[in-house]
């Protein structure tokens, strides 16, 4: 079920009303209702995938139950490896089977040998990369004795399947989200209002900014041989805003929806395109995944401690794994490697934690040097996005070759693209509102730059009206494929 669909527009109020008016006095009934609603939400795509999420839930709940006992360290380690094997095995089979098979066959052909292998018609279950990491964090934290196991299967099932963030995050940790299923939840009007604001902003970013930018980005990427460097660069910039509006828009809707039910999810995006270097960008982009890899991969490998060789190894490991997590294509691996190359100079010069506070936090506008740093970081990120968007590696290279050619200085044939200037206006509006709202967890949280209440309501109604105008198509979210 898509957040930007009529189905969800009917589904959410129904779930909300029954949750608060039918089960307000009974936590277990609320949890049971959330599990039912979440399974309906997830099964809307394909009910057969419900068996996978139920299987993952049962496995990690059972392993967690044993990890809570006083067992020998060898047994506890075996249980952890069982959890890792089951979850990563499912993820590897459904997501990477064809990638490894195709590359295995290609390796044989490289040495002049033909190798035949049967291919399977495997459909990638929606959200499997997200909920497997969420259940894995539960088992790992139990093994590390950072949390205690839950005996309440219903609460654990609700934690794994919680529908607002089930399909594309944020990837929550058991220590933060799971306890919220045990506390009595009383309707909080101010929290719900904030949730509605965040949903509104998320829908604007997805339906208005991302989907309009996608029309231009797709037209350019799908016909890249027909355009000069200036148009190709513009296509990459439009894709940068497409993926940001699409993914951060989903996160905003998810976090806002969770607030309607009395839950607090972690911030997943913190205005990343205002970053002054790549290290800051990765602290602000897909925060739940970046911190997951930091805590469960990077730090166990040694982090930034040790010599230069260890720093190089760990940095490339974290970015390559992150790239591979995104998809079974060499383009994602190269995208990860390119970001590692961007990051390394900052790490080696110990400048990777230079910008921890949002830019111009105490000022209305950035300084000249900060502005240039933001533009430079955005352009580096945009060039890396070419690999993320390209169909294959050769397409990405030819696209970049086109950008770095003399045609970079040609005029852009804007008349060929529908809604070109309108899309530019919406991107500008996005940046404007996010700039003045950057001190909050999302752009509309405080609106401290708008003094009058009537003006704030005008902004809300205007955004809602624009969303309504562009809400005809139910475009899927990009990260559903991951």
Image (tube, rainbow, N blue to C red):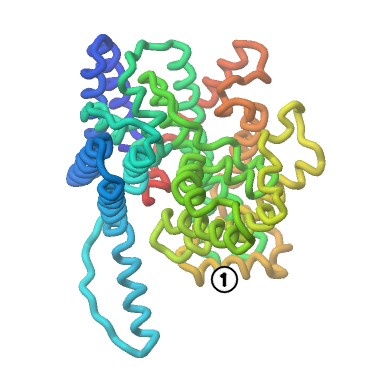
Looking at the image, which residue is at 54% across and 57% down?
A: 314
Count of numbered labels shown in the rendering? 1
The local secondary structure at tag 1 comes to: helix
The image shows residue 97 at horizontal and vertical percentages of 29, 64
Q: Quadrant of the N terminus?
A: top left
Most foreground residue, 323 or 201: 323
Can you see residue 225?
A: yes
Which residue is pictured at 21% across the width and 18% down the height?
Answer: 29
Q: Furthest-front residue in view? A: 72
**Camera-nearest residue between 375 and 159:** 159
Q: Give the residue at x 32% y 41%.
A: 139
Using a 10 Å C-alpha cutoff, classify the residue at mark 1 as few (fewer than 14 neighbours), some (14 to 19) or many (20 or more).
some
* Residue behind mark 1: 398
391 or 228: nearer the eye?
391
Residue 145 vs residue 246, the one in the foreground: 145
Relative to 392, say whether 37 is above or below.
above
Q: Can residue 212 be seen in this view?
A: no
Residue 330: image quadrant is: bottom left
Q: Residue 133, image x and y in percent?
A: 36, 45
Residue 60 spot, x, y in % from top left: 25, 41
**Image: 149 above or below 349:** above
Q: Residue at the far bottom: name it.
A: 112
Where's residue 182, x and y in %? 31, 20
């Amino acid at each position: 079920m898509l957040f930007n669909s009529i189905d969800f527009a009917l589904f959410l109020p129904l779930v909300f009303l029954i949750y608060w008016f039918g089960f307000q006095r009974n936590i277990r009934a609320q949890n049971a209702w959330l599990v039912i609603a979440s399974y309906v939400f997830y099964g809307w795509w394909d009910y057969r995938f419900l068996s996978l999420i139920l299987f993952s839930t049962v496995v990690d709940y059972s392993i967690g139950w044993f990890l809570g006992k006083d067992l020998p360290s060898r047994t506890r380690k075996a249980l952890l490896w069982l959890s890792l094997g089951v979850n990563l095995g499912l993820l590897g089979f459904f997501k990477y089977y064809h990638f490894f098979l195709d590359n295995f066959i290609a390796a044989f052909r490289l040495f002049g040998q033909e190798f035949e292998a049967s291919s399977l018609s495997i459909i990638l279950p929606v959200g499997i990369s997200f909920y497997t990491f969420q259940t894995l964090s539960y088992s790992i934290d139990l093994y590390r004795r950072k949390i205690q196991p839950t005996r309440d299967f219903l609460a654990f099932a609700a934690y794994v399947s919680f529908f607002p963030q089930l399909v594309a995050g944020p990837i929550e940790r058991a220590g933060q989200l799971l306890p919220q299923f045990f506390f009595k939840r009383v309707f909080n009007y101010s929290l719900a209002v904030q949730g509605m604001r965040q949903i509104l902003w998320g829908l604007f970013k997805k339906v208005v900014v991302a989907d309009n930018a996608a029309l231009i980005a797709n037209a350019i990427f799908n016909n890249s041989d027909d355009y000069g460097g200036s148009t190709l660069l513009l296509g990459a910039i439009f894709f940068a805003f497409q993926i940001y509006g699409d993914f951060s828009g989903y996160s905003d809707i998810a976090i806002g929806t969770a607030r309607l039910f009395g839950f607090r999810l972690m911030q997943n995006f913190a205005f990343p395109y205002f970053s002054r270097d790549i290290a800051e960008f990765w602290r602000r982009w897909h925060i739940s995944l970046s911190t997951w890899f930091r805590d469960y991969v990077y730090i166990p490998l040694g982090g930034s401690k040790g010599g230069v060789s260890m720093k190089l190894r760990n940095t490339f490991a974290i970015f390559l794994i992150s790239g591979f997590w995104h998809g079974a294509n060499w383009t994602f691996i190269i995208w990860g490697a390119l970001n590692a190359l961007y990051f390394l100079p900052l790490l080696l010069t110990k400048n990777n934690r230079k910008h921890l506070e949002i830019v111009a936090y105490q000022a209305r506008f950035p300084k000249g040097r900060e502005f240039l740093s933001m533009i430079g970081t955005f352009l580096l990120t945009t060039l890396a996005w070419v690999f993320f968007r390209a169909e294959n590696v050769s397409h990405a290279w030819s696209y970049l070759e086109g950008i770095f050619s003399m045609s970079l200085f040609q005029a852009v044939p804007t008349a060929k693209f529908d809604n070109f200037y309108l899309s530019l206006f919406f991107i500008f509006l996005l940046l404007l509102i996010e700039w003045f709202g950057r001190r909050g967890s999302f752009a509309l949280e405080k609106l401290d730059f708008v003094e009058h209440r009537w003006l704030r309501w005008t902004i809300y109604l205007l955004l809602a009206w624009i969303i309504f105008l562009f809400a005809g198509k139910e475009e899927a979210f990009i990260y559903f494929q991951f």
